[in-house]
Amino acid sequence: NEWAVESAPPADAPNIVFVLVDDVGFSDIGCFGGEINTPNIDRLAEEGIRFTNFHVNPMCSPTRASLLTGLNCHAAGMGHIAQDDPGFPGYRAEIAENVATAAEVLRGAGYATLMVGKWHLCRDSDMSGGGPTKNWPCQRGFDRFYGILEAFTNLHQPHRLIDDNHVVDVDRYPDDYFLTDDLTDTAVRMIRERGASRPGQPFFLYMAHPAA
């Protein structure tokens, strides 16, 4: 038997950022012809790759499952919103165990895998502090996660935030708290922390803001 060796990405491996914008129409973003001024998103589009043939599903969780797995939502096990589990294989309200996420694939290739924002890919019954956590982000390929497991929350007074695999204990939010800012600042901090400890390691960031 050979000794296990940690995979190392190629020297020119790019950093990868997935940005999923919640509840926004295709034409709302400037780089796709929208009338709303979105300069930072437009710059990301210019410097990156646009998924011009990505088929958005008509609901939230199925679209997220397709984006993270590259599969039809039913093949990924998420044919409907995550809360409902009627028992059929394509509608189990969680990403199927035999399906790999982009985070699992990239972590296996030596990437740091980071996520902030809205998950919405596990059942309501699995979202308590006691889990089970088998379909939480850190069990589906992400080294770090900060955000919400649910479909939505109050953007100024979130009912519950998750940091990796534990519920964040918040006594009181600042008066000017805004979840979008918190998530963005946390993503930047995650990238800087990883870069400081492992310089040169490429990262995969999945940024899924709950706010439009």
Image (spheres, rainbow, N blue to C red):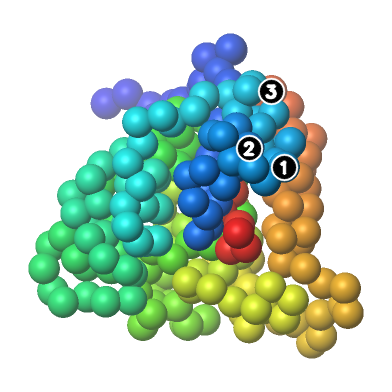
The structure residue drawn at horizontal position 63% and vertical position 83%, both measured from the top left corner, is 159
Task: Give above or below for 212 relative to 141.
Answer: below
Q: How far across and how far down the image is residue 6, in percent?
A: 47, 29
Q: How far across and how far down the image is residue 208, in percent?
A: 56, 53
**Residue 135 visible in the current orientation:** no
Residue wearing tag 2: 30
Q: Are marks 1 and 2 in contact (CB under 8 Å)?
A: yes
The structure residue drawn at horizontal position 38% and vertical position 80%, both measured from the top left corner, is 124
Could you say whether the residue bearing mark 3 is in a helix, strand or loop? loop
Along the horizontal axis of the image, is 27 left or right of 47? left
The disc labelled 3 sits on which kind of residue? Gly
Q: Are marks 2 and 3 in contact (CB under 8 Å)?
A: no
The quarter of the rendered structure image containing the N terminus is top left
Q: Nearer the viewer, residue 200 or 43?
A: 43
The disc labelled 2 sits on which kind of residue? Gly
Task: Name the residue furthest front.
Answer: 35
Residue wearing tag 3: 200
Task: Name the residue furthest left.
Answer: 88
Few, some or many C-alpha atoms within 10 Å of disc 3 (few <14, some 14-19, many ≥20)? Answer: few
Q: Nearer the viewer, residue 205 or 29?
A: 29
Few, some or many C-alpha atoms within 10 Å of disc 1 (few <14, some 14-19, many ≥20)? Answer: few
Residue wearing tag 1: 37
